[in-house]
Image (cartoon, rainbow, N blue to C red):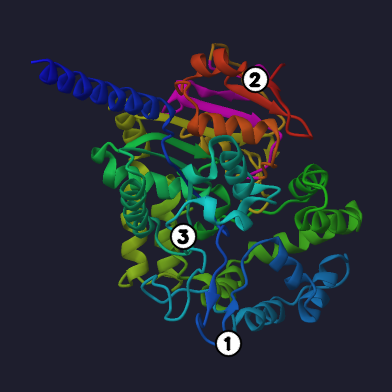
Amino acid sequence: MKRVVKLLSVLLATVLLFTSTSIAFAKEAVTPVILVHGVGGSAIYENIGTDAQAEIKNIGFGEIKDVLLNKGILSQALKLLGSETELEPSELIGIFADFFKDSAFNLDSDGNVPQGQGILNYWEDSMENHKDYWENAEKSEEALVRELCETYGAKNVYCFNYDWRVDVVETAKGLRRFVETVKKNTGAKKVNLVGCSMGGAVLSAYLDAYKTKKDVARYVFVNPAVGGVDVARMYALDLKITKKGVLSYLNNMQDKNPGSTQVTIMKAVKALGDVRVGYAAENLADFAADKKNVINLLNQAVKPWLGNVVALWECVPYDCFDDAVKKMTKIGYLDKNSGVYKKIVRYHKVQGKFAHNVKWAKRHGAQVAIIANYGEPGIPVTSKASNHIDGLIDTKYASAGATVAKFGKTLKRKGKYVSADKVIDASTCALPNNTWFIRNIQHMQFRAGTQATQFIAQLACGKTKLNVKAVKKAYGLGQFIHGDDNQALSNVTA
């Protein structure tokens, strides 16, 4: 009998030991976080695996610098700066067409990636094995990855890298497979997803298709392109350039992000002087006023370069989409029989359901946070240049519905959802209690080691519930936040 009692005691002690160990591990477990980058987050290559493998040029400010240094384009640009010289539209269009004709950036007519192209940094393992990607990162998505790794451990952080030219609905399918792989490899039942810029649109498509799986603990949208970008109204032939708009934009942007290519270009243009820049704006306005010029530029230069890049089409604002399709079809830029058309129509439906989907996710237990930056004037090429943007995406779209004053104006509203500077009323957002606004930090220009990146990391992986009240109690930051030049954060005041 004593032996039986001893045996039972050993068995009981063993069970208690394993039980307590499991509890300890459960308390320490960190839900894996997956960051989804935006446009340009992964370099795209052609002729992969061959001696001719090379990176395909992007569409960022670095490429704009290359455009401006082209002799033919430079000669036309100089004509813009004078009051007595006449721009030659056909010559300008021809030079641009020639400049972009050899670009391998475009997708095929069905919006698919040409054979031999793709990315090289698709990793299904954690950032613990890819320290060269984030250890010395200074800004943008990589800086957020660095903050997440340093705070929560690189073994718990993953990056879903993808060819950002393609349809986000297709990309969301790839993200689904990625999530399943991470869960399988870690044993986790849920993950946290962070979508930055275009990555926010990927999360929107993911949420629409897979929300019922209920295996995402947190959805964090950072400057998301979920509602479109007003500059994409150019697809609806909405072009408006004014001297006032151009000068306002340059004055505001030249002091942002010191040392960046963007600022170098802005300062170089501004250094020409208000008079010359004014002439350039007026000449460009005359060019854009002639719809024949715009149509020829689109079809001869833009279409061969990026006309089939589905993701750019998916940046068209929801309320502008039908008009854009109608006009681009009429001029021959868009083919309704193509795969590109089928894909952009499919995503348009997803775009219209974003508010419904995030509300559904919240009701069914997921934590949701939406972060929208503001404080910059609109890009001065459309009729919406007076909007508040974050440097790229309009604040009203990134926030899923905020009422935002025109740049330089204020709202005549009161209430707990109205910012102290009277610029934003968050009561009209899809999720008023789950949406934050950061002033004075440009689109995805979050810098490593700052309060700004720390704040986003806390929302992404912290224990605090994602609502305005709980976050303010935990971190002292309300719904409307100001970032200074060092990206130290404080609450917005009047």
Q: Nearer the viewer, residue 152 or 8?
A: 8
Q: Which element carries disc 1, helix, strand or loop?
A: loop
Identify the residue position indicated by label 3 in the image: 123
Tell me, yes or no, whether the highlighted magenta stretch contains residue 192: no
Calculate the distance from the C-alpha at mark 1 to the C-alpha at mark 3.
23 Å
Left or right: 350 in relation to 395: left
**Given contact means CB atoms under 8 Å apart, are the residues at marks 3 and 2 in contact?**
no
Residue at (63% x, 80% y) in the render? 97
Identify the residue position indicated by label 1 in the image: 52
Q: Is residue 353 visible?
A: yes
Identify the residue position indicated by label 2 in the image: 422
Disc 2 marks a residue whose amino acid type is Lys
Residue at (47% x, 30% y) in the render? 369
Up/down of 410 relative to 340, above or below: above
**Given contact means CB atoms under 8 Å apart, are the residues at marks 2 and 1 in contact?**
no
Q: Earlier in the sequence, mark 3 or mark 2?
A: 3
Q: Earlier in the sequence, mark 1 or mark 3?
A: 1
Q: Position of residue 159 (x, y in %)?
A: 49, 52
Q: Position of residue 448 (x, y in %)?
A: 69, 42
Q: Nearer the viewer, residue 462 or 214?
A: 462
Up/down of 245 relative to 23, above or below: below
Disc 3 marks a residue whose amino acid type is Trp
Left or right: 362 in relation to 100: left
Up/down of 180 relative to 81, above or below: above
Q: Which element carries disc 2, helix, strand or loop?
A: loop
Q: Position of residue 410 (x, y in %)?
A: 66, 23
The quadrant of the picture occupied by the C terminus is: top right
Q: Earlier in the sequence, mark 2 or mark 1?
A: 1
The range drawn in magenta is 417-444
